[in-house]
Image (cartoon, rainbow, N blue to C red):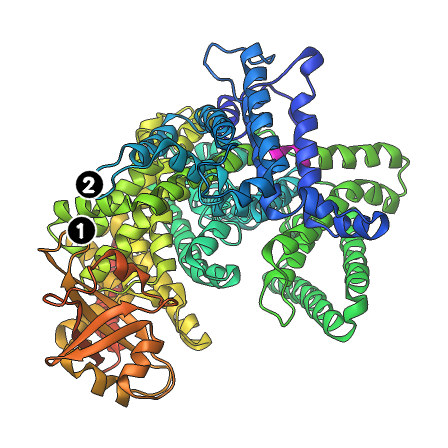
Amino acid sequence: MPTDQKPSAAQELVAQVDTGARTLLGGQKNIIAIICFSWALYQLYIASELPFILASITGIDFFQFIGNLSISRKIHLAFSIVLACLAFPLFKSSPTSKIPWYDWLLIGGGIFAMLYMVAMNTNIANRAGDFGHSNIPFDMSVAALGLFVLTIAIYRSLGTPLVIVAGILAGYVFIGGGNWGGASFVKGTWHFWMQEEGVFGKPLAVSTQTIFLFVLFGAILEKAGAGNYFIKIAFALLGHFKGGPAKAAVIASALSGLYSGSSIANTVTTGTFTIPLMKRTGFSAEKAGAVEVASSTNGQLMPPVMGAAAFLIAEFTGVEYTTLLKHALLPALVSYIALVYIVHIEACKLNLKGLPKPPSNKTFTNKLIGFLAGFITVSLLFLIVYFTLGWVKASFPSLSVAMVMSFSLFFYLVLLYIASRRADLVVDDPDSPITELPVASDTAWTGLYFLLPIIILLWCILPTPERLSAHISAYYACLAMIFIAITQHPLKALFRAENEIANNISRGISQCVDGVISGARNMISIGIATAAAGVIVGSISITGAHGIVGEFVEYLSGGNLMIMLILVAIMSLLLGMGLPTTANYLVVAGLMAPVIVELAAKSGLIVPLVAVHLFVFYFGILADDTPPVGLAAYAAAAISKGDPIKTGIQGFAYDIRTALLPFLFLFNTELLLMNVTPAKAVLVFIIATIAMMLFAAATQGWFMFKSRKWESVALLLIAFTLFRPGYWLDQVSPPFIEKPGAQALQIIEQLPDSASLKIRVAGPDFDDYDIQNNTSIILQLGPSADGETRLTQAGLQILEEEGKIIIDALTWDSKHKQLDRSFTFGEQDNPVIIDKVYIVRERQAKELFYIPALLLLGLIIFLQLGRAKRAKE
């Protein structure tokens, strides 16, 4: 039954971390809601065609005034700062029901600093670099004020850790150290505030243009009832299995992760219902909380939103958003399937039963026919929707928007009519007993129309000849979701011939407004985090500070690549503690991603940049369940009444499989579906799923039956072989034939068009001329030509002297600019040279190593099934 209770401890934690703990009363009661709603309207306005329509009517370029990206990111940050001051109390002793006078001062200072940037936008751009200009002193005063207010906003909305990280890096910009001599106050402050390489850089631009709309879409979807629908359908389908509530929690969290931007909010949203049910079916408080924590943190890895970090990863790596989704999908799916399997193992250990199914007189055959009929009907329905929309867009481009809207409306009305024939889903009281599960078919039809805006989003964004950008796709999805939120209840009442049309219209508008306000509140910390990330990225870009971190990691590891990666993983966990998803990624990626690229290249491993960013992203996310700070673990423990530290430890134990994946896809990029055919992608998915389930079984000490120690070790060996068969092949037959660098020109000349070639570059270190440095790169060669021409096309200007191929300089458009930061070029007595050339060796297929692994697996299955049979006798 619906409940009306005061916020729980878990909900209060979400407010403190994600949306702000202040709830205003009296005359100030609606201030935050009004500003949030205004912010959402502004973001929808700049994403729409409205500015251009108004310009054509009035002759005034409204988009130029407040809609272009340079100005809109300032307005976006202004909203973030104002709401951070309103929603997040500055001190623990600060009032939570009213706004104190000092917050009004901070709000005024922040608004003034932003309005100055908007009003003087062109003038500031014109005097860039002219530090002798008469306006510079006032510019610097405004910049200092803006940075001060931003720092306070970071502290109150994101906490001390991010202030410390950003403060240390910003301090390094001014103070200097090592090879960086430090910047003047004017130069450093200008870099951070007055140009778009600091606070107003790429992260804030992505937040302004794209992230807000996706978060808004998810919030409206949640408030309209989709979150409850996903929980109910997961329970209806899985609740009767062993450990059913826990398995349902995993699936519900995965579905929520499709649109959620916070692992903590995800934990509370689904955990409020799932954790008590898990406890009632036999899970301990800590294990129930840990399952929810592992599910919710993994939800941040699930495309298409990935905790709102997907768009930032795409921006930083230069990979198209849809390509990134392809790379991120398989690891996320494999991780979730393995978590369901872990829950199954726990249920087997505890001999748990599922929840009772609803009574039914249908035979198994009738159920199977009904399931297949429903599945085929739904599949055909959505295939018709998808391909009809594509045909309309291709055949009637001028009418495509109107026709797509018409078709979408038709299918929405059909699905809503079907839903109206069934009772509406209610939010259950998690503390009330469940006597039986809901009927799966009825539950499924009740909210199937919630998938329509998701289909519209995917249709707009997935690769097609006329694919839309991510932010435009999200804009149309938001419009569809707003329409559904407002109309679903009155239309159901109409279809049911009820007389509550007006009340249901009011209910729909209320849910929509709540969703809009919730979306804006969820964006406060993200907007501030992306501005803070601008300080971090700006500090690194001007000083090369990541090089210091790289030297530190290299020193500790002694040059061993695996130790380096483990150290980077640990540092990513530490940096991510206490930070929400987006801030988490921005901090760890800014500091640690360049370190992996540089140190891996020195070890001869060429890692795609997107794999590196996913590596640090995964470990940053895992900080949410890592003791002692894991915020998601504290939220789950508040619901389960268990120990938060034990909950976090158990959650991290469940997430060891997720921690394994980044190491694997760095060495085996097929797991990211890179350079694979569709058939190979299916094979990789099947093998990776089996391998991850075996790894989970090994870590849980249970497979078909309780495992003996040697069996667990063998399962780990089998899992490793399935994940990375190339490792064993490399031991038998090295992947490359090593040739002297002096032969590079002849080798390159013989390679086919568009070939790639791995080379090792050696020369004097950029930081210390007396040290010889070396690193490996992959050259992308163009059409057939002589060796020197192809090297120039690949970005290297070379000279041939005394039997050496000397890299004299990099071309202006070279893709290997990182060499400029690694070597000292132009030294005649100690030049930078092509030291080695690596030719790919023809070898047997690495998949041959699957055979002994699967034979060993068969032996373990045979032995364990025998023990299980004897145990039953």
Residue 384, position in %: x, y? 71, 68
- Going by the image, does 28 lie left or right of 123? right
Residue 469 in sight from this viewpoint: yes
Secondary structure under tag 1 reads: loop
**Picture disc at residue 315:** none
Secondary structure under tag 2 reads: loop
Instruction: Indicate the amino acid at tag 1.
Output: Asp
Residue 389 shown in magenta: no
| Mark closer to the chain start, 2 or 1 | 2
Question: In front: 672, or 229?
Answer: 672
Residue 863 in sight from this viewpoint: no
- Going by the image, does 191 lie left or right of 359? left
Q: How crowded is mark 2: few (under 14 residues within 10 Å), some or many (20 or more)?
A: few
Residue 214, position in %: x, y? 59, 47
Q: What stretch is highlighted in magenta?
A: 516-521
Instruction: Indicate the amino acid at tag 2.
Output: Gly
Q: Name the residue under label 1.
A: 767
Question: In front: 755, or 353?
Answer: 755
CB contact under 8 Å: marks 2 and 1: yes
**Picture disc at residue 178:** 2
Residue 519 shown in magenta: yes
Distance from Cα at disc 2 to Cα at disc 1 = 9 Å
Is the residue 390 above or below the residue 578 in the image? below
